[in-house]
Amino acid sequence: MNSDPATFLVFGDLHGRVLPAFRLAACWSREYRTPLAGLLQVGDLGYFPDLTRLDKATIRHANDDPLELGVQDVIRPTELADAVFADPTCPPALWFTAGNHEDFDDLERLAHGHARDPHFPVDHYLRVNAIQDGQATELVGGLRVGAIWGVDGKESTRRTNLPNRGYIRERSVDRLLHRPFDVLLCHDAPYSAKRAGFGSTLLATLIELAQPAFAFFGHYKGAGSRSAVGFGKTEVYHMAGFELHGPGGTADDGSVGVLTWADGRGAFEYLDPAWLRTFGRGNWKWR
């Protein structure tokens, strides 16, 4: 018996642009007459609830672009968030993995407080959810989404400016291997999936052994694309950053895609670049 597909939008790095992501999703849902079950996101949400704990890169970018601090609009009640979430076509929730630009201490605190839950909310509205590191959560339509936090810490391209929690943990990869999941959300790339010699061998091994239907990652610059490297039956996609740096400040090509899932099978495609260019920093609040 065939069931109706569940539809999700998948976003690249947000770096604070949480409300613009929800707003774009609402616009897409309305114009394409397709209800959304939710949003998936590949890390670098920009989760910094305490502005005194911003990392250096976020401080630098926020000086030029206040959208980098957009998490402030959802960790407490705000008129802007109230308006975005009041839209009847706004999707109910977003699920994300942790990247390398997050407040890991606060994420760890929340994770420990929800140790029995596969995901936990990080915002006032209970719409923005972190998936536990090395866990999988089941969403609408039976879609099982797993998450690995952080970036590679062992290869020659290791970043040296992160807290220990910002690196991929082998025990988290091992834990996820023992759980069924259909989609992997990771921040770093599986090894060589985007650039030869870059990425994580742990993530590549996880995908090769578990063979989920899809894996999505962010972290790297450039347009989103499907990896040319084969990972068995798993379709591996890079999501460009959703930073509204496209032409005229519009949504970036390859930064958002649509995932449909029904009866244990799915399909993914990037949103039309022409449509993305109708949405940008100049009109997102009322688009």
Image (cartoon, rainbow, N blue to C red):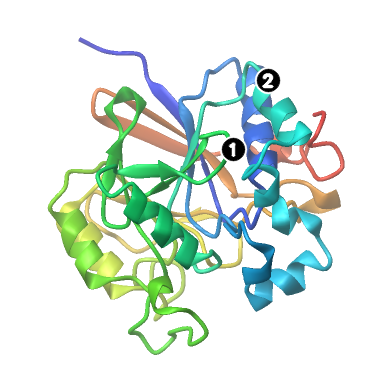
Name the residue beneath numbered marker 2.
Answer: 87
| Residue placed under numbered mark 1 in the picture | 271
Left or right, residue 10 beside residue 175: right
The residue positioned 63% from the left and 16% from the top of the image is: 88
Q: Looking at the image, which residue is at 47% across and 66% down?
A: 104
Proximity of marks 2 and 1: CB atoms separated by less than 8 Å? no
Please provide percent x and percent y for residue 125.
Answer: 57, 33
Q: What element carries label 1?
A: loop
Residue 220, given in percent of the width and then of the height, sits at 54, 67
Which of disc 1 and disc 2 is earlier in sequence?
Answer: 2
Can you tell which of label 2 and label 1 is closer to the viewer?
2
Q: Image height check: is 69 above or below 201?
A: above
Residue, x 67% and y 34% (percent of image)?
24
Instruction: Identify the residue at image location x=68%, y=26%.
Output: 27
Q: What residue type is labelled 2?
A: Asp
**For residue 21, which quarter of the picture?**
top right
Crowding at dot 2, Cα within 10 Å, few <14 / some 14-19 / many 20+, comes out as: some
Three-letter code for the amino acid on which mark 1 is drawn: Leu
